[in-house]
Image (cartoon, grey):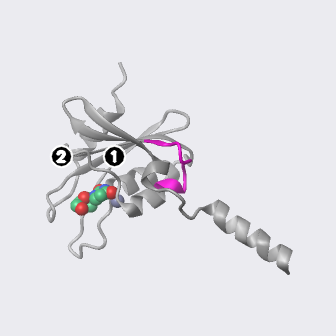
Amino acid sequence: MPESLVERAREALDNAYVPYSEYTVGAALRTADGTVYVGCNIENANYSNSLHAEEVAIAEAVKNGHTDFDRLVVTSGARDGVTPCGMCRQTIAEFADEDLDIVCDLGDGETAKYTLGELLPNTISLDTLEAAAEKRERDE
Ligand code: THU
Ligand code: ZN
């Protein structure tokens, strides 16, 4: 039986590098063709260079030619239902529609499910910039 996305995200916690926060985060991202990429957070002594679990999973997917996302699961060692931060929400939005399901692990088989549109409504996208470029051309 294939492992669930929640299990894949939890496995990724094992590789989290978190000497500063000691707060592990794991992400499992399923792409349109069913391929799963996982990521963990990777911290840095300068703090601001820290990579988030979602960013790492997204980078793996895009690097391998997968830019269409189907489902994202996020977990933390604390099993506190952590959701992607604002920065990660915007990065996810680059490759997913508002109806993307984002599932957050609450432990004990419980999850909280959101859509990307609920977590990040009305954000800037490629469409925004293309529409602006078209308007500039019309106005010239
Ligand atoms: N973290 C993530 O990996 N993803 C998020 O979207 C929220 C925050 C990580 C960054 C840092 O290593 C730790 O959680 C505490 O903020
Ligand atoms: Zn983040």
Mark 1, ligand 1, within 8 Å: the answer is yes
Which residue does the numbered mark 1 point to in the structure image? 27
Left or right, residue 53 beside residue 102: left
Looking at the picture, which amino acid does disc 1 mark?
Answer: Ala
Q: Position of residue 76 (x, y in %)?
A: 22, 47
Looking at the picture, which amino acid does disc 2 mark?
Answer: Gly
Which residue does the numbered mark 2 point to in the structure image? 77
Q: Tell me the quarter of the image containing the C terminus.
A: bottom right
Disc 2 + disc 1, Cβ < 8 Å: no
Q: Looking at the image, is mark 2 or mark 1 earlier in the sequence?
A: 1
Q: Quadrant of residue 48?
A: bottom left
The span picked out in magenta is 92-101
Q: Quadrant of residue 81?
A: top left
Secondary structure at numbered mark 2 = loop
- Check residue 95 for magenta coloring: yes
Q: Nearer the viewer, residue 61 or 110?
A: 110
